[in-house]
Amino acid sequence: MLRFIVRRLLQLIPILLGLSVLLFAWLRALPGGPAQAALGERATPEDIARYNELFGLDEPIYVQYLRFLGRAVQLDFGTSARTGRAVTTEFLERMPGTVELTIFAMIFAIGVGIPLGYLAARKHGSWLDSTSVIGSLLGVAIPVFFLAYLLRLVFAVELGWLPGSGRQDVRMDATRITNFYVLDGLLTREWDAAWDAVLHLVLPAIALGTIPLAIIVRITRASVLDVVNEDYVRTANAKGLATATVRRRHIIRNALLPVSTTIGLQAGLLLSGAVLTETVFAFGGVGSAIYEAIFSRDFAVLQGFILLLAVVYVLINLLVDISYGLLDPRVRAR
Amino acid sequence: MTAFGDVRRRRIDELAARAGAVPEGEGGVSLTRSAFRRLRRNPVAIIGAVIVLVFLLVAAFAPLLAPRDPLAQTLLSQIRPGSIPGAQEGFPLGVDNLGRDLLSRLIMGSRQSLMIGVVSTVLGVVVGMALGVLAGGLGGWVDTVVMRFVDIVLSIPSLLMAISISVLLGQNQYALMIAIAVTQVPIFARLLRGSMLAQRNSDYALAATALGVKKGRIIFGHVLPNSLSPVIVQGTLSLATAIIEAAALSFLGLGDPDLARPEWGAMLANAQAFLSIRPELAVYPALCIIVVALGFTLLGESLREALDPKFRR
Amino acid sequence: MIPAEPVLEVEDLAVRFTRRGEQPTRAVDGVSFSVAPGETVGLVGESGCGKSVTSLAVMGLLPRRGVEVSGSVRFQGQELVGAPDSQLRRLRGADMAMVFQDPLSSLNPTVPIGTQVTEVLLEHRDMSKKEAVDEAAALLDKVGIPDPRRRLKEYPHQLSGGMRQRALIAMALACSPRLLIADEPTTALDVTIQAQILELLRELVVDTGTALVMITHDLGVVAGLCDRVHVMYAGKIIETADRHDLFARPRQPYTGGLLASVPRLDGGRGAPLTPIRGSARDTIPWAEGCAFAPRCDNAQDDCLTEVAGSTVSLEPDGPGRELRCRHPIQYPPSTGGATASGVLR
């Protein structure tokens, strides 16, 4: 198992190097180049020339790349043209919100998706089954941002049941420790602050979790239907095991294998969806930051955030692979 | 020894045929034809196909179907801050915030939306397949290089990738199509390579090699055609994703700024500002996107069922 | 000798598959047989003839939906057709057990062998976890798996094919069942392993007096193991005989064809093998006539119902034999079975 993890870690190196080349090239290829990116849209040609000289942009391209790489390794991605603050600092400040949002979205998607998919398969052909199949097809077809707006309009604006923007009521004046607002509330025992943060998460998490929910329902259903017909389930029944034992040990356990891979594969979708959802709910996480960066042409932030998110994404995939190895003895053997 | 009368023999043959027993295999029906047969019997496939067909027809005949000029601003006197006129005589779905007939815009918009979906998917399929054939066909270091590249592109979440490309290429419809296509390329490359590898190691390919058939002929004559079905399935499903992704890019302000070409994604993104005044402005284009995406998804899923032997129960 | 009370009596068993939107099909039709303790009965036929469906129907393992089972299955005097699921579960694994064809797919890939053995014991016998583990190790040892303690912790993919089948047999034997049904238990195995597994099953019958139903298409298995044989074709039993009688003087042309299509040492080199014409698809419904008629060399016009005016039925055919055929293979009364093979062709 340890060797498996080490091998997967080593495989990350070429991917991360490739990513850095790609994003380095991207910034170079932008109209105006990195100087514009750093100085913002209103930079004069003189400013740009001065900047190019100052940062060695007249040097050969590979020297520039190595320098970029050297800084990237130290997590230095320059400063935001809009706020003038270090890109990495901004990222670290905003990431906890996005992490909280994606965790809640996943809890929603898994917590509802697996039981629903399982029930649909158990009652194969019933109205519950057909409804969940149609629902899961619709869930994939709805544009995330439209769903987010709809939820916000109905439950926040019209009905007023839940907050519709931000991560916490500004009047809360909560103590910040980790920037995970829910966690901060729990750590400082400011229960009302924690609860308020949770309430702020509900609507965005549902919007963001809907696509993964639809996918998980479908995969769980299909997988349970597959497993029920497996020979080893017949064996288990032939052994006269109690129905509950057959379900738990022989059906659900095996049916969840493909579901767990699918859950891992949702990470990319969640990070993409977070950009849209956070924008609608003015959530202030990484996703909102990317929207703001697009809007204000803040290329340094875009470059840094995309690179860092890609690294996060790659690491999540690694974790998924490892956990799959833990679940399925056959993968471990390889 | 055959004491069987000819009349009786014929009668038995007839009975045997009625019992569904054809003497030789599946009667030499090709995979494609039997898949098509299964597809026609599947109501889900029919629904998907009808949806897709209807929208394609609407797009094809849009100028004839649209009751009004989708760009003409009308009813301007009725538009005030906080109020946009709804459905009325001559405007079955009402007008948008600039007084343009919503129905006509939806009908004309189908052209641009479907175009973006189709072009970007075709682009993604072609480039992805080329890479996949290179990797899966040649193997060796070519395979390693291509797949590493694909892995790198895949390591950026798709919307972020599309954002980067759009920002790079500027705001126009071609940038939008390329941006979406780029996110699809790695999927198709991986898919085709994987299914080609499986086919290359299959018994029939080994048998052909053993018979001395040339490598190129095996790959293009046998392996490639047999590897295509997952690509066809994914291609159909990707049409849905492409249309939704185009809407997302429009929403982020990276869409096609040319107002002369109405497009559902842009209409939907625009309408968000008026959601609490006239939600229909957003709901109709959203419905169009959802229904078309649903149509392609239904078609794709039933194609998968028809083509994948595992699903034939 | 007083014949022992049969463990299993199957009478007029029929299974119909009724799938929505499809013509219902009769997979098993009017099948009757019985098995006594210590006896081995073979159900023989080509794939698709209904022999596996028969065994699943006996065990009550067919899905409830889309399947109609009628007739009677009495196990130790209890009627199983229509019995509640809880009663079946109490019997299965404890009093009646089954060994399946493909040992790899019949074992749960994600659960260690040990758990898969102990779960039967814990379900049906009053045992602690530790006792169950000890018993499981003893069982694996009994079926000839070396180093059982280590094997208990392993997963199915870590075992060889023969070892997996032994493990499956160990699970089936865990609670010393009165009836064991083996559905093609050797088909997926190498020839040398096949012989070992058959030997294991034979010892078992001899040692414990378990009644064994052997489902197979392999006449070698029948020859080596079975006391009595039922040959099935298209869902019906077409010939029943003791092993010796069946091999010496097959009466149904189908049985004769099966025997003639297997190479025989006493047939001499170069003796032609005669396969049966056509395939199992070339059948007609039993209601219309003899299902085997389209492939049969002996077939006459009266094999069809519309000519003879009645369907072909299963009739007594000498001591201990039954036959469903209007034009069976004839043997000259004076000659013994060994030379009768000439008559077959």
Image: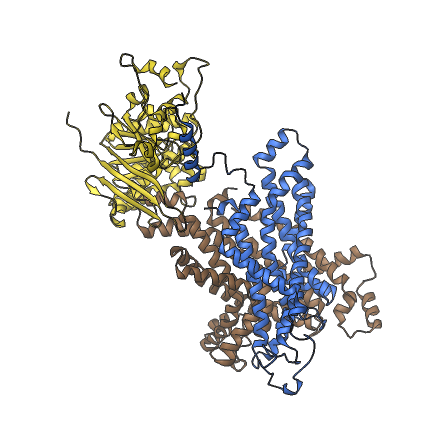
Task: Tell whether C266 sits left or right of B160.
Answer: left
Q: Nearer the viewer, residue C271 or C39?
A: C271
Q: Quadrant of residue B75?
A: bottom right
Taking the image as shown, residue C339 lies to the left or right of residue C2, namely right
- Work out whether residue C1 can be spotted: yes
* For residue A313, above or below residue B216: below
C153 lies above or below C252: below
Q: Residue at x 27, y 44 (%)?
A: C70
Tell me the quarter of the picture where residue A70 sits: bottom right
Q: Is residue A229 left or right of residue B230?
A: left
**Horizontal side of residue B124 vs C258, given as left or right:** right
Residue A209: x, y in percent? 51, 65
Q: Give whichever of B178, C103 is nearer the camera.
A: B178
User: What residue do we see at 27% from left, 25% from top?
Assistant: C241
Tell me the yellow chain: C
Q: Quadrant of the N terminus of chain B?
A: top left
Residue A89 seen in this snapshot = no
Chain the render paints blue: B
Instruction: Please state the horizontal and vertical placement of residue B70, each as a whole percent of the image.
Output: 67, 74
Q: Position of residue C24 (x, y in %)?
A: 37, 46
Between C301 and B116, the one lying in front of the other is C301
Q: Quadrant of residue C47?
A: top left
Q: Which chain is brown?
A: A
